[in-house]
Image (cartoon, rainbow, N blue to C red):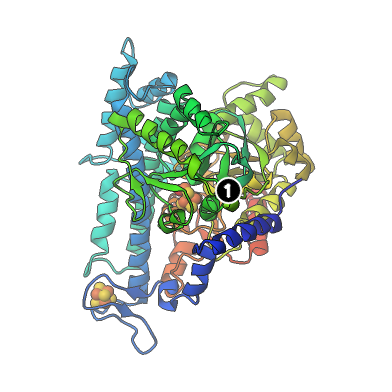
């Protein structure tokens, strides 16, 4: 049985009551204080790029002091928003490259998937014969780091894309050059007195997005696999019920697996477990929040406590000894909130420093020591729990996660073998789509946002899609919404149409596949490219669409831009704050189609959003005559 949204909400209500007892603030209360939002901001027509402003566009004042109109202002805001997201993902990727560079046989980090490293090295034209795997790792990490600042040429990863897509990118000047350069160019273009032409701003927004998805994020995903292992199907559990009343609960939150992997290692350290027992706990439970959770769930089966808008809930259980964070999507609210409980809020990255936290600077060289110190701090904090505040909602669901492209191909091989077909291709999936057993696929991604009833859009859409024989692939907080609801339990096949149900049975998969964190949307680009190459069809002709129904972050826009630029129509449930400019709306929803054969659709009515996706998939099928 699925967990319903109402049950999620009842559990939250109960936790908020605890919060009230201890005088805690909550996002639910802050949303009320912030409503109504500033209309100029919502429509993207407030500019504070120079101190002659801020300027806001109204009927009476159609131009800023410099003369920039609504289109230029909304366009610049959109490009800066994208640049923020691209920088964030790509910097995460860079950190992973540095971790790879620090890997050594007897150091903190090892190469867990040498085969994948060799595969990428060959792809990049390196001689691998007889090379020590760590020498190769260092050489590869240096090459990858150079992708961030190389003076000439375009991103190496682009060679994975089908030829048709590459031609479109070349013609539209969308190929990302050095990763950092695209962010710099975006900042330069949006400086006072540079670009104010929507077409140019949108073009750079797509290219900056491309530097993320086909640059920095791809480095992040691929080299995380090399370091920590390429995910394969693994069982886990999701929702707050994974926390344990009789154990030390360590919550890991953020994004970079360099930290979370190490915490997981040391939470299994016999010395730490013995310490926990000596203090009255029966053991140590690690659980995740946000993309960090996705990373360690996919590789280790570490349970998922919750997604973005559940982060305060883990502290409100009163049973969280430590919430350990690195970068991105961390509420500064966790500082004051943790002070209302015994919880230690431990920040670890110079990139994300927050008041009211204990800062333990974490880096690749001292990772082991740092992780041990953090785990010890959490364990020693167990005795400070205030028993009368402890309440863990007894809700959790089983989930099977870990569907990297490699794992999906492996599952498809199971089907191919049964039919005597060649292994290692996406052909069985394409056959299912051509025959109509599957109507198509939706890549559903992104955050929660209080503008949408949290998780409800994700879950509603997934249920609708699988019922219509549409396979759903997921990442980020969308994936966690699915897992918490129970849609990643293989038994959820019973909620599917007959076709998808049969595929789930044959391939032994759940109907919604967890592909990882948000940087792992690069995996989806690789999968789409493979489908295109194996079928001989352009990506844009495949019955495949993208969707972010509850998105909120700059990263999400950067992602949307590279997904669209890859030829995948993308459906948003939250407005990208450009509605104050008809030209920006035109460029994003129609204009870009001339460059990349895909565009955005924005629809805040979730039922209609689902219908629009299904209609688009059916249109694509009809155009192919299948
Ligand atoms: O990068 S889905 S709330 S956690 S931004 Fe953040 Fe959004 Fe979650 Fe991961 Ni992605
Ligand atoms: Fe106003 Fe132009 Fe300055 Fe923006 S750049 S704040 S529109 S004067």
Task: Using the image as rendered, state which of residue 509 and residue 261 is in the foreground.
Answer: 261
Q: Position of residue 39 (x, y in %)?
A: 44, 78
Instruction: Give left or right: position of 491 versus 408.
Output: right
Residue in view at x 48 percent, y 74 percent: 33
Query: Which part of the image, by quadrant, shows the N terminus?
Result: top right
Instruction: Give left or right: position of 105 versus 42.
Output: left
Examine the rendered structure and indicate whether residue 143 appears above or below residue 187.
above
Q: Position of residue 549 (x, y in %)?
A: 57, 58
Task: Using the image as rendered, state which of residue 116 and residue 437 is in the foreground.
Answer: 116
Instruction: Give left or right: position of 418 versus 253.
Output: right
Residue in view at x 48 percent, y 59 percent: 552
Query: Which part of the image, by quadrant, shows the C terminus?
Result: top right
State the image quarter where residue 378 is shown.
Answer: top left
Q: Position of residue 58 (x, y in %)?
A: 38, 84
Ligand 2: give its quadrant: bottom left
The answer to whether residue 445 of the structure is visible from this angle is: no
Examine the rendered structure and indicate whether residue 461 appears above or below residue 423.
below
Q: Position of residue 360 (x, y in %)?
A: 32, 41
Q: Is mark 1 within 8 Å of ligand 1?
A: no
Which residue appears farthest toward the bottom when viewing the image?
60
The answer to whether residue 360 of the structure is visible from this angle is: yes
Examine the rendered structure and indicate whether residue 421 appears above or below residue 386.
above
Q: Residues within 10 Å of mark 1 (few under 14, many from 20)?
A: few
State the image quarter where residue 132 is shown.
Answer: top left
Task: Using the image as rendered, state which of residue 589 and residue 209 is in the foreground.
Answer: 209
Residue in view at x 76 percent, y 35 percent: 502
What is the number of callouts on the image?
1
Instruction: Give left or right: position of 450 versus 272.
Output: right
SS of the residue under disc 1: helix
- Judging by the rendered image, the residue that carries numbered circle 1 is 387
């Amino acid at each position: 049985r699925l967990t319903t949204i109402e049950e999620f909400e009842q559990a939250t209500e109960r936790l908020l009551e605890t919060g009230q007892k201890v005088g805690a603030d909550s996002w639910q209360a802050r949303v009320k204080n912030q409503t109504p939002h500033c209309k100029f901001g919502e429509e993207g027509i407030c500019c504070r790029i120079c101190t002659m402003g801020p300027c806001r566009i109204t009927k009476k004042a159609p131009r800023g002091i410099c003369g920039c109109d609504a289109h230029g202002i909304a366009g610049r805001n959109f490009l800066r928003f994208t640049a923020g997201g691209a920088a964030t993902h790509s910097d995460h990727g860079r950190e992973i490259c540095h971790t790879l560079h620090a890997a050594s046989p007897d150091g903190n980090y090892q190469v867990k998937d040498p085969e994948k490293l060799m595969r990428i090295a060959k792809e990049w034209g390196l001689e691998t014969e007889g090379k020590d795997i760590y020498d190769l790792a260092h050489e590869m990490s240096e090459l990858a780091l150079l992708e961030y600042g190389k003076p000439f040429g375009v991103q190496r990863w682009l060679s994975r894309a089908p030829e048709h897509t590459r031609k479109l990118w070349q013609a539209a000047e969308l190929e990302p050059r050095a990763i950092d350069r695209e962010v710099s160019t975006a900042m330069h273009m949006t400086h006072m007195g540079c670009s104010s032409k929507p077409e140019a701003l949108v073009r750079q927004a797509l290219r900056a997005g491309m530097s993320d998805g086909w640059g920095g994020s791809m480095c992040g995903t691929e080299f995380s696999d090399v370091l920590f292992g390429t995910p394969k199907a693994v069982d886990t559990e999701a929702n707050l019920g994974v926390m344990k009343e009789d154990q030390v609960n360590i919550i890991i939150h953020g994004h970079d697996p360099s930290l979370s992997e190490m915490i997981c290692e040391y939470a299994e350290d016999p010395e730490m477990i013995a310490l926990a027992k000596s203090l009255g706990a029966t053991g140590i439970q690690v659980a995740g929040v946000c993309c960090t959770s996705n990373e360690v769930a996919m590789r280790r089966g570490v349970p998922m406590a919750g997604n973005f808008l559940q982060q305060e809930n883990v502290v409100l259980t009163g049973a969280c000894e430590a919430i350990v964070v690195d970068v991105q999507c961390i509420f500064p609210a966790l500082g004051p909130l943790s002070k209302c409980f015994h919880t230690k809020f431990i920040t670890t990255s110079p990139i994300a420093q927050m008041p009211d936290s204990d800062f333990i600077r974490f880096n690749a060289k001292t990772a082991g020591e740092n992780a041990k110190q953090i785990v010890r701090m959490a364990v020693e904090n167990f005795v400070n729990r205030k028993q009368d505040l402890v309440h863990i909602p007894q809700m959790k669901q089983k989930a099977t996660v870990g569907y990297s492209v490699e794992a999906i191909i492996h599952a498809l091989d199971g089907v191919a073998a049964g039919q005597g077909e060649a292994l290692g291709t996406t052909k069985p999936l394409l056959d299912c789509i051509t025959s109509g057993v599957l109507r198509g696929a939706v890549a559903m991604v992104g955050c929660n946002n209080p503008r949408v009833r949290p998780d409800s859009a994700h879950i509603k859409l997934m249920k609708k899609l699988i019922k219509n024989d549409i396979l759903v692939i997921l990442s980020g907080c969308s994936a966690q919404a699915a897992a918490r609801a129970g849609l990643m339990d293989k038994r959820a096949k019973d909620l599917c149409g007959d076709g998808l149900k049969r595929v789930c049975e044959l391939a032994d998969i759940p109907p919604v596949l967890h592909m990882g964190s948000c940087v792992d949307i690069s995996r989806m680009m690789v999968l789409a490219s493979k489908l295109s190459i194996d079928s001989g069809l352009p990506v844009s002709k495949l019955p495949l669409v993208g969707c972010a129904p509850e998105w909120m972050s700059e990263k999400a826009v950067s992602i949307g831009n590279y997904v669209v630029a890859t030829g995948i129509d993308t459906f948003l449930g939250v407005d990208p704050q450009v509605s104050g400019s008809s030209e920006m709306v035109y460029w994003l929803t129609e204009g870009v189609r001339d460059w990349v054969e895909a565009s955005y659709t924005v629809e805040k009515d979730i039922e209609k959003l689902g219908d629009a996706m299904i209609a688009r998939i059916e249109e694509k099928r009809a155009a192919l005559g299948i």
